Amino acid sequence: MSKNHKKTTKRYTKHRGKAPAAAGIRPSKSLGQNFLIDEGIIETIVAGSGIGKDTLVIEIGPGTGALTLPMAERAGRVVAVELDERMIPGLRVKTYSLGNVEIIHDDILKVDLKSLIRENLEKYDLNEVRIVGNLPYYITTPIIMKLLETGTGAASITAMMQKEVGDRIAAEPGTKLSGAITYSVHYYADVTEITDVGRECFYPVPKVDSVVLRLDIRDECPVRVEDEDLFFRCIKAGFSQRRKTILNSLMSMGGYEKSEIAGALAAAGIEPERRAESLNMEEFARLADSLRGGSN
C-alpha cells in the first residue's frame, strides 16, 4: 500500500458517522449500497480501466458519482445507469456542467445495452466502449454474465465485487479455487486483477473486502465446442455438487443415463473419479462434444 493510499484511507475512515460523498443520502441495504470514498482507490480504478478520449464508458451503479466525474475527465463520453432514483438528482447536479455525461435511471439488467452503445458510438464518433461498475454484491454474477453473453461489443468490463467472488472468477480453470463462474468468465474474457479494496474504503463499512477485476473480452473463445449450451450445462452440473465425482455430479443434468455419461468421459479421456475443479477448459469442451456425439 502506497503512502498516499494510507493517508487517503486514514482521512476517510474518520467519518464513521456520516458519508462525506453521499450528500446526506442514507445507503440502501436492499440495493446493497456501499459508497466508495477512498480517492486513491478511485484513481486506481479509473487508471486501470483503460479508458481514453475515444472511449464510451457505460457505468453501472454510479451512486454518488465517485467514479463518474474522474472518468468523465478521461473518456469521450460516460453514460451512467443508476437504479436508485434518490441518486439521480445529485448525479445530474454534479454532472450538469459536463457535456459528455448522461445519467439514466434504469436497471442495468433491463437496459438494451446493444442499442444504447450503438447509438452513442455513432452519435459521438467514438472508437470503443468499456464498461465500469461497482457491482451490488448480491447480483454480481447475473450482471457479469449478462454483459458477457449478450455480446455488447465492449473491449472490457472493469468491476468491483466481493473479494471471495472475485478470487473465484480470477482463478485459473482447473484449480481448487475455480468454480462454474470461473469457466464461464474465462470462456469470454482474460481476467486481470486491478487492486484489492479494503472494507474501510466504503461507507458504510461492509463486512467483507472487495477486489477490482478487468475482464478483457476475447476476440476468440479459448476452446471450440459443437454445442455451447451443453458445454455450460456440463460445467454447471459438474460444480453443482463439487464434492462428488464428475461422473456422479453430471447426473444432475438429466436426460442421460449413467452409462452414457461414463462413455462420454472415457471418450474424452477423463477418469470418472475426478472432480469438476480438476478439469480444465479443454477437458470440459471434449466432454460436452462427446456427450453430444453420443446423443446423435
Image (cartoon, rainbow, N blue to C red):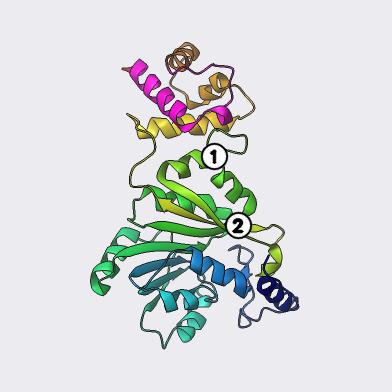
Say whether disc 1 or disc 2 marks the residue closer to the N-terminus: 1
Amino acid carrying label 2: it is Val
Q: Can residue 205 be seen in this view?
A: no
* Residue underneath mark 1: 172
Residue at image x 39%, y 19%?
A: 290
Q: Answer whether residue 279 is magenta in the image.
A: yes
Amino acid carrying label 1: it is Glu
Residue 49 spot, x, y in % from top left: 47, 63
Residue 261 spot, x, y in % from top left: 47, 17
Q: Is residue 146 left or right of residue 3?
A: left
Q: Give the range drawn in magenta.
A: 268-295
28 to 90, vertically: above or below: above
Residue at image x 71%, y 67%?
A: 200
Q: Is residue 123 visible?
A: yes
Classify mark 2: residues with Cα within 10 Å, few (<14), some (14-19) or many (20+). some
Q: Answer whether residue 287 is magenta in the image.
A: yes
Q: Which of the two discs, 1 and 2, sits closer to the camera?
A: 1
Residue 224 versus residue 97: which sits nearer the camera?
224
* Residue underneath mark 2: 211
Quarter the C terminus occupies: top left
Q: Mark 1 falls on what kind of element?
A: loop
